[in-house]
Image: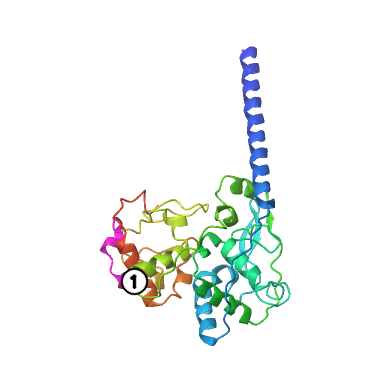
């Protein structure tokens, strides 16, 4: 019996040792990704100054950026978890604690389109893999609006990524956009604005819908801990029975035609509610144009 207990202790000790080594390796790998520097010289983007362009930028910001950076652009808390760490969204204005007074136009392009700070470090929880798809016109308008915003004093704080957060970065759950983007790749084409499936696809790409709903939009388990299964958006799911008006109402209210409430912590419908009916219709037309793919899993828990 004693011999058996001895060997049991040896095995348990060995497993604990292996677990400690694995954790140390993953923390080191995540730390290495955080400390990687990227030499990115973005292509020039013209920043307009006319009122129409600034208004277009405000529209885009409201739908795709304000959820993290707040409506006043002063920044907010994206992650504040005792195990993972603290990740704020930057104050984009020229007020105290903001980057608006120090970022050049190129710095804004690098940060938004490439997920890289002026010093070459990767930005944490910045969805540049989606914003990579912004056309030059839309990106220029977005930056024009950011530069026009009045200064707001707010010091969001420094990014702190704890060991668990570094492990999540290492395994790709909390991925860094700068690590996912082919920075020298040719720019993706952008269609003309219109109530078309092609423009709807552009908006789906900018909104990064696939990060939750899967590569084929047929449903997936989002990477964010605690998130429910993201439903199938192709005609193979319940949207096959929807009309454009149903889709618009769902995004406007956060409630599906059958009365299911969308959790805004995981589905940012209050942000997408800023989109016009035409843009939401374009997205719906794109989703309806997809092949009907069988749902990838349970759509509601």
> Is there any visible trace of residue 218 in the rendered image?
yes
Query: Which residue extends farthest right?
Result: 96
Q: Which quadrant is the N terminus positioned in?
A: top right
Is 96 placed above or below 130 here? below
Going 64% across and 63% down the picture, which residue do you hit?
A: 41
- From the top left corner, tell me how far across and down residue 52 is, in percent: 50, 85
> Is there any visible trace of residue 249 in the rendered image?
no
Residue 35 relative to residue 126: left or right = right
Is 138 placed above or below 173 here? below
Going 52% across and 82% down the picture, which residue do you hit?
A: 53
Q: Main secondary structure of the magenta part?
A: helix
Q: What range of the chain is rendered magenta?
A: 235-247
- From the top left corner, tell me how far across and down residue 265 is, in percent: 50, 62
- From the top left corner, tell me how far across and down residue 58 is, in percent: 53, 79
Q: Residues within 10 Å of mark 1 (few under 14, many from 20)?
A: some
Going 59% across and 75% down the picture, which residue do you hit?
A: 143
- From the top left corner, tell me how far across and down residue 86 is, in percent: 66, 58
Within the image, what quadrant is residue 103 found in?
bottom right
Front one among 75 and 175: 175
Helix or strand or loop: what does disc 1 sit on?
loop
Within the image, what quadrant is residue 202 found in?
bottom left
Front one among 144 and 230: 144
Where does label 1 land, which residue? Answer: 196
Residue 65 relative to residue 246: left or right = right
Is 164 placed above or below 64 here? above
How many numbered dots are placed on residues in this image? 1
Within the image, what quadrant is residue 94 found in?
bottom right
Front one among 178 and 94: 178
Q: Is residue 266 magenta?
A: no
Is 275 placed above or below 110 here? below
């Amino acid at each position: 019996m004693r011999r058996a207990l001895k060997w049991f202790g040896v095995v348990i000790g060995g497993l604990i040792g292996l677990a400690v080594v694995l954790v140390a390796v993953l923390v080191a790998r995540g730390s290495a990704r955080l400390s990687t520097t990227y030499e990115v010289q973005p292509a020039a983007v013209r920043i307009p100054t006319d009122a129409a362009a600034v208004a277009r930028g405000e529209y885009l910001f409201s739908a795709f950026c304000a959820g993290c950076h707040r409506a006043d652009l002063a920044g907010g808390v994206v992650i504040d978890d005792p195990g993972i760490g603290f990740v704020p969204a930057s104050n984009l204005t020229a007020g105290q604690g903001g980057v608006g007074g120090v970022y050049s136009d190129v710095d804004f392009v690098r940060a938004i389109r490439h997920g890289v700070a002026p010093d070459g470090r990767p930005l944490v929880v910045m969805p540049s893999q989606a914003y990579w798809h912004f056309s030059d016109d839309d990106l220029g308008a977005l930056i024009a609006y950011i530069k026009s915003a009045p200064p707001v004093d707010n010091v969001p704080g420094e990014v702190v990524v704890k060991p668990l957060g570094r492990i999540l970065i290492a395994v790709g759950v909390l991925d860094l956009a700068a690590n996912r983007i082919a920075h020298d790749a040719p720019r993706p084409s952008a269609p003309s604005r219109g109530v078309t499936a092609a423009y709807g696809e552009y908006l789906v790409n900018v909104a990064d819908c696939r990060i939750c709903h899967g590569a084929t939009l047929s449903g997936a388990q989002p990477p964010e801990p605690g998130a429910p299964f993201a439903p199938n958006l192709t005609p193979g799911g319940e949207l096959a029975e929807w009309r454009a008006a149903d889709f618009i109402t769902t995004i406007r209210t956060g409630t599906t035609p059958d009365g299911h409430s969308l959790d805004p912590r995981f589905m940012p419908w209050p942000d997408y509610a800023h989109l016009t009916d035409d843009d939401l219709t374009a997205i719906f037309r794109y989703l309806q144009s997809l092949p009907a793919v069988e749902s990838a899993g349970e759509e509601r828990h």
